[in-house]
Image (tube, helix red, strand yellow):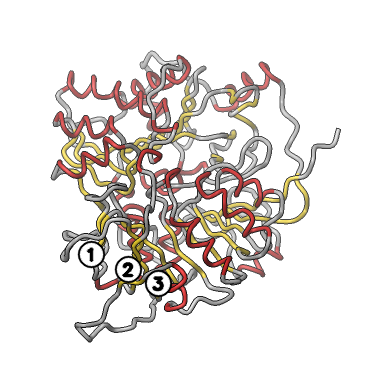
Amino acid sequence: MINKVGRDIPQEILDLTGKEVFQGAYAKQGVEYKTATHTVAPVMDPSYSKVVNSIEEVLKKCGIKDGMTLGFHHHFREGDMVVNMVMKAVHDMGIKDITICASSLGKANDPIVPYIEDGTITNIQSSGVRGKIGQAISNGKLKGLAIMRSHGGRVRAIESGETHIDIAFIGAPTCDEYGNCRAIGGKSDCGVLSYAAVDADYADKVVAVTDTLVAFPNIPASISMTKVDYVLVVDAIGDPNKIATGAAKPTTDMRKLLMAKYTTEFLVHTPYYKDGFTYQTGVGGASIASTKLLADHLRKDNIHISVGLGGISKPMCDLLDEGLVEKIVDTQDFDMDAIENIKTNPNHIEITASEYADPFNKGAYVNKLDFVILASLEVDTHFNCNVVVGSDGVITGAQGGHPDTAAGAKCTIVIAPLLQGRIPAICTNVTTVTTPGETVDVVVTDYGIAINPRRQDLIDCMKDVDLPFYTIEELRDMAYKMVGEPDPVQFGDRVVGIIEGRDGTIMDVVRQVKDFEF
């Protein structure tokens, strides 16, 4: 069945999942539903201890069995240790057919690939899967399906009951014996626990895993003791030095700096650039550079950002400390500076992933965005974006908050170089659609800028602005003239993953890759 972005979704996948095809970014506006529920084991005896001695013990207490769904969060990013230690214990106990529902999985979780291959893990639900896990899925080693969701989409799936988590594991930098979890104050601080909040609210069993047990009460708690069944103390839950990945570092790349300049100049000439606007940017090199350039305009024009959103890094915190941003609402910290900032600045505030981006609550922060600046692996002539599947067809990225913020912001700006290596990033059709073009307003490349024809208002206000404007087709043609039109990726017939729209409909499917045939 053909969906709203022109992708043919196989009927067998619709039958298998019970899902609908994507019908538009706002098709589910106002459609009522009942939220899910979960089981609760009351703690009434004041002498009862929640503290357990091992992962094996807590798994047994939680009633681990074949076919369960386990929840994880990724606030430790490439320093995460919780997923690996839990899944090793699950494997060693001989448990099979596990579904992992994680906010994201990265290269730090490569050690679980053998558990995919031997059937310990048969399904994965995640924002993204990088490294060897993505390779394994693309090569058809996962027996079930990989479901890729946005951050808001994951919350929606859990809150609506589409996904039910049997046991949630919350990596807590500090925790007391009764289960009050905080993201600071320990040896593995990650700043916030925003993604874990929905797991704590809806999982049948919640296990706080900590390497720093502190005195009761550990407050103000990110995750309350009222949500936690067990507390497990281990040697280490994560390496905080690996939270800051390469993506979160400033750039000296002249192409990225040029795109940052174009982005900033475009932004300040829109009608949304006025005192009190709201703003989110990613942590790619060009995005970070654009934030620094924007700061110069804010000082010159005596304009302030009312709220900075999303995953937070040092440049946004610097603006907060300077007074150019009034408040930061934080769902993920990308570097140590951001972690330190939330400890000391009262205007740097933790929010849940539901508050941030859930499309099925009564209004998320993303809906109040004026600007969001995003990156993309590919953008096509319909302004559709691909942020998950690489040019070789292998799963290598994450939806993250990309579809959520694009749908919410008044002005969505996507940064992409004209060429990724020798592969056109601006193309006729993206390999896989992750963010629909109807929610993308502007594409900025190192060769010029394209405005979505749907946004005639933005086209009109840029008529006298000295920037290199082109149609998206002209940018594509530039790319193809330089390196030629690439042959399409060759896929097999088997569907190994689905790309969900944030409302739970199917945006696209991912098929098993096959060796290129000349």
Q: Earlier in the sequence, mark 1 or mark 3?
A: 1
Between circles 1 and 3, the one closer to the viewer is 1
Q: Which mark is residue 203?
A: 3
Badge 1 element: loop
Residue at which label 1 appears? 176
The type of residue carrying mark 2 is Val
Badge 2 element: strand
Query: Measured along the vertical axis of the image, is residue 201 above or below residue 440?
Result: below
Q: Earlier in the sequence, mark 2 or mark 3?
A: 3
Q: Is residue 5 left or right of residue 155?
A: right
| Rendering quarter of residue 120 | bottom right
Where residue 484 sits: x, y (%)?
Answer: 71, 21
The type of residue carrying mark 3 is Ala
Determine the CA span between mark 1 and mark 3: 20 Å
Mark 2–mark 1 CB contact (< 8 Å): yes
Look at the image and tell me whether residue 474 can be seen.
Answer: yes
Query: Measured along the vertical axis of the image, is residue 309 above or below residue 4?
Result: above
Where residue 63 sits: x, y (%)?
Answer: 47, 79
Q: Considering depth in this image, is 454 or 331 the residue closer to the camera?
A: 331
Q: Residue at x 54, y 39 (%)?
A: 385
Residue at which label 2 appears? 231
Q: Considering depth in this image, is 438 or 506 the residue closer to the camera?
A: 506
